[in-house]
Amino acid sequence: MTVYFDELETRDPQQRERDLMTRLPSLIERAKGAPGWARLLGHIDAGDITSRAALARLPVTRKSDLKQLQQAQPPFGGMNATPLQSLSRIFMSPGPIFDPEGCGEDWWRYARPFHALGLRRGELVQNCFSYHFTPAAFMVEGGARKLGCPVIPAGSGQTEMQVQAIAALRPHAYAGTPSFLKIIVEKALEMDADIGSLRRALVGAEALPPSLRAWLREHGVPHVLQTYGSADIGNIAYESMTDGEVHPGMLLDEEVLLEIVRPGTGDPVPEGEVGEVVVTAFNPDYPLIRFATGDLSAVLPGMSPCGRSNVRIRGWLGRADQTTKVRAMFVHPSQVADVMRRHPQVRRARLVVSGEMANDVMTLFCEVDQPQDDGMAAGIVATIRDVTKLRGEVRLVAPGTLPNDGRVIEDARKFE
């Protein structure tokens, strides 16, 4: 029997959608009080943003924009609705990109994934995310503390000490990257140390391939759940299980609103199609609105067997930034989207750059209802030249021909 964190997890999906739309205007109004958001949304009447269609008309802010925004107005680009002096921590990720943490309980929302893992009050967690500059360790620590679970602030590295701490303190759960957990288990085997108390693990920050999940199960850690999050948003989605069986997909957190958009644009794609993850976070301190993570994923249809009713995504499927250089000029996914906008007959497009170094061939594959329409192809060729300032070929193909992998630009050149 599944025990849920709260009643929000099992809401009727239509009720959840109504609740999110009802909350949108006040979030946008609060964001407009921050100077950075005022520049982006100052012309928007927050009371008008009560549907996904209305939300989709707002600009997308990309993670790749943060460095420039923060340089122009340190430390957060004017995107924080709570002033600096009222925050609890400031983190620095490579870039540098600075991220705030407010003073609220479980500010990054990691109690839900810990609860889904089976962690309960009083159980001990060995936290092996880094406590140095970046927020991951504090994210999961906040979730553990919300559940009433003490934490060993182990950090990363010092593998032998990690094993010694597990053997002596008998923690119930591990938090950290899956690869470091494997290293710890291997070191324990080498030391002939008993770390059998460690039966559960909440992992993130890198991929968990099925082979590694199986290896961990075979070596004494049977319950491993992945999370998907970012240093800007915190928990976005997490896996769930029933009776030890991990279910497909990752459940959205109850405090985020998800859109999947065509890479390089803010245009939502049909359900099931791979695109870029765009998140609106209901965070009063740092209200990110249509924040493009740069990651690819897709909505997984249907409800999770665990009984939680929120939307599921397929997990991390790659990076959305597919900008490439052709004949000394950059070609961007947004330019492919521009070509599609000018030719609405095109359902989906994929620009393939082939050939060899200094002899690039650029071909735009377009899914259309009438692939034999030479006049349409000629018009698209002209648009490619106008938009990219480069010559390109066009191949019209039938709907469903192109792979559903989120790729808008494929670099297939040979550089050997």
Image (cartoon, rainbow, N blue to C red):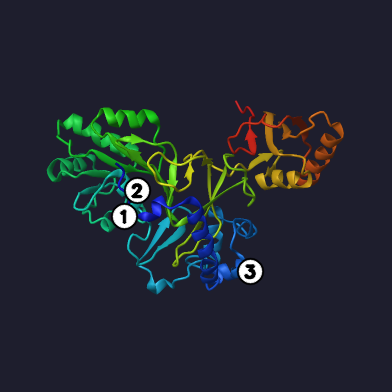
Question: Residue 193 falls in which quadrant of the image?
Answer: top left
Residue 366 position, x and y percent, is: 73, 35
SS at badge 3: loop
Asked if one can make out residue 134 in the rendered structure from this viewpoint, the answer is no
Residue pictured at 49% horizontal, 60% vertical? 19
**Nearest to the observer: residue 358 or residue 18:** 18
Q: Which mark is residue 44?
A: 3
Question: Which numbered disc flags the more N-terminal residue, 2 or 1?
Answer: 2
Dot 2 corresponds to which residue? 113
Give the spatial CA distance, label 2 vs label 3.
Answer: 35 Å
**Nearest to the observer: residue 293 or residue 17:** 17
On screen, residue 10 versus residue 186, left or right, reads right
Question: Which numbered disc flags the more N-terminal residue, 2 or 3?
Answer: 3
SS at badge 2: helix
Residue 150 position, x and y percent, is: 21, 54
Q: Amino acid at mark 1?
A: Gly
Question: Which numbered disc flags the more N-terminal residue, 1 or 3?
Answer: 3
Q: Which mark is residue 219?
A: none
Residue 199 position, x and y percent, is: 23, 38
In the rendered image of this protein, does residue 132 appear above or below residue 247? below
Residue 261 position, x and y percent, is: 60, 47
Question: Residue 343 falls in which quadrant of the image?
Answer: top right
Q: Amino acid at mark 3?
A: Ile
Give the spatial CA distance, label 1 vs label 3.
Answer: 35 Å
Dot 1 corresponds to which residue? 143
Q: Quadrant of the N terminus?
A: top left
Dot 2 and dot 1 residues touching (CB under 8 Å)? yes
Q: Residues within 10 Å of mark 2 (few under 14, many from 20)?
A: many
Give the spatial CA distance, label 2 vs label 1.
Answer: 8 Å
In the rendered image of this protein, does residue 378 appear above or below residue 334? above
